[in-house]
Amino acid sequence: MSDHRKLASAIPPLLENIYSAATALRESLGLLQNAEKPWQHYLLQPPFAQDAALSLSQSFDLPFNMAGALYSQLDYLEPVGTGGDARATLQVPGLLAVPAKTLLMAEQLNSHKEAFAGAIAEFRAALAERPVAEQDRTVRELLGDAGHPRAHLRQCYRLVLLCPERPDAIALSWIKARKSIRKVTVKWCEKKLVQLDPQGGDPGIQYQRQLLAGLHKSQHEDLRQVQVQSRPNLQVAEIFYGHGTDEEDEYRQVGYSSMPVLVEANEAGQLPEFTRVDHQPSLSRRRQRRDLALSTEPFLPALRVFLRQQR
């Protein structure tokens, strides 16, 4: 058995572990939603979180069910290969108070995700001499053979944020998206689209090539690629542990809350003290003026290329 085939054979059970663990976590959160004792929650509802709730067919009135659906949504909600941005993930920021057994389930899910991500990385490394498009297709075929043809790799990789040791306080804040806009050429766009679909078998990519070929010459100078380095989601800036008088207080950064952060609850099911923020971050005027020069919908979604609007 060749090296890459041996690596491939290890991936299906690892992926199945993720789906099983995510289902178990969702069921545990569902029990908390329906429990007689209320468990404290704090979910924010910026536009992208409302879109995520709509995609999941969930309501913010049932936050634990919402979180469970989000953690277990490991598949693409749109057809694979339609030319959209494969990096896009569903995001709902916030905090949930949970018991220790639920935290253990989340830790187990994270462990399975890390093992799967490592196995995929090893498999790709074994295929390093092949074109990137062929690597992607081979991985996608492997996921299909594992029984999950629509598995969303980013959803399968990203970990659930945890506070397994109950902090004394949590500081929340919004981060702002850092956006880079650069001019690109028709030739560059065509080259990148061909690289994404060298065999010409993806109808979404081929449609975008047709759009590019039909672009009027007067608009060739209006192509702009937009790269977003970070989404404006909630940042769990710090968790705070207050020690005794003989020890210094401890501050620790948790990470970006693209999904609800699970925090160990007290006996009453409550969160630690935490800061509250607006449902969405404020937008800087400068970035807004730059963005308004671009069309609202991407011209070439696969490349995140927009057309500059004429003024």
Image: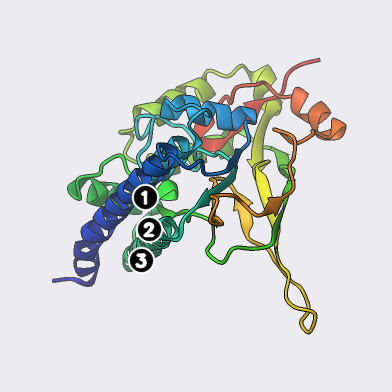
Looking at marks 1 and 3 on the same chain, the residue that comes earlier in the sequence is marked by 1
Q: Nearer the viewer, residue 51 or 62?
A: 62
SS for dot 2:
helix
Q: Position of residue 143 (x, y in %)?
A: 26, 49
Q: Looking at the picture, does residue 224 appear above or below residue 276?
A: above
**Tag in front: 3 or 2:** 2
Few, some or many C-alpha atoms within 10 Å of disc 3 (few <14, some 14-19, many ≥20)? some
- Residue found at x 48% / y 24%: 54
The residues tagged by marks 1 and 3 sit, at their Cα atoms, a distance apart of 18 Å
Residue farthest along the right direction in this orientation = 285
- Residue found at x 37% / y 50%: 25
Q: Looking at the picture, does residue 161 appear above or below residue 155?
A: below
Residue 11 visible (yes or no): yes
Instruction: Tell whether 309 sits left or right of 19.
Output: right
Q: Are marks 3 and 2 in contact (CB under 8 Å)?
A: no
- Residue found at x 43% / y 47%: 155
SS for dot 1:
helix
Q: Position of residue 241 (x, y in %)?
A: 70, 68
**Residue identifier under label 2:** 105
Few, some or many C-alpha atoms within 10 Å of disc 1 (few <14, some 14-19, many ≥20)? many
Few, some or many C-alpha atoms within 10 Å of disc 2 (few <14, some 14-19, many ≥20)? some
SS for dot 3:
helix
Q: Are marks 1 and 3 in contact (CB under 8 Å)?
A: no
Looking at marks 3 and 2 on the same chain, the residue that comes earlier in the sequence is marked by 2
- Residue found at x 13% / y 71%: 1
**Residue identifier under label 3:** 115
Q: Nearer the viewer, residue 244 or 118?
A: 244
**Residue identifier under label 1:** 25
The residues tagged by marks 3 and 2 sit, at their Cα atoms, a distance apart of 16 Å
